Image (spheres, rainbow, N blue to C red):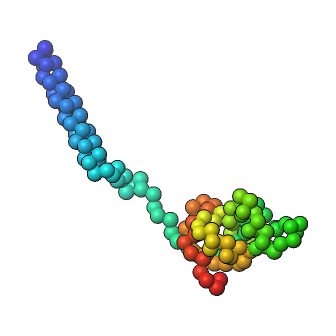
Amino acid sequence: MKANRFWIEIIALCAGVAVGLALAIVGVVVVASGQPPEPPQSAARPAARQQTYAGIVTCSRCLAKHSAEIGATAAGCARVCIRDGAKFSLVDGDQTYILEGDPAALNRVAGQRVRIVGARNGDTITVASVPAGT
């Protein structure tokens, strides 16, 4: 009986050492490559698909209802609100999206109906381009 227990303990010890060595080797390889290991494909997040979205570029504060009190156009009102901390938005009917992208390009089309190309994630569109003449 004691002989069997001795061999079981030896096998368990060898298995533990083998697992420890395998983890140490993986750690050395990761540190040497400077890159974390790639996640399995099933866990990888799919890339967002580029699409065209149409609507009016405005600000997150006023949306499509700009203040008449400041006496500015829709573009002027949106620019004032953006300068004061609001975010660029795209309003298309009942849908509203926050726009992330080149502020100069978005500022150029503020207050205008445009078609933008970008990838949507929830209620945010990462703008890839604002085609000229939209």
Above or below: residue 9 compared with residue 67: above
Q: Is residue 89 left or right of residue 49?
A: right
The residue lying furthest to the right in this view is 69
The residue drawn where x is 50% and y is 65% is 48
Q: Compare residues 122 and 101 and report the one nearer the observer.
A: 101
Q: Position of residue 45 (x, y in %)?
A: 45, 57
The residue drawn where x is 17% and y is 22% is 9
Q: Position of residue 81 (x, y in %)?
A: 75, 63
Q: Is residue 16 left or right of residue 115?
A: left
Q: Position of residue 37 (x, y in %)?
A: 33, 50
Q: Is residue 131 in sight in this rendering? A: yes
Q: Is residue 32 left or right of residue 36?
A: left
Question: What is the quadrant of residue 67 in the picture?
Answer: bottom right
The residue drawn where x is 59% and y is 81% is 131
Question: What is the quadrant of residue 75 in the picture?
Answer: bottom right
Q: Is residue 125 in sight in this rendering? A: no
The residue lying furthest to the top in this view is 2
Above or below: residue 9 compared with residue 30: above
Above or below: residue 8 compared with residue 78: above
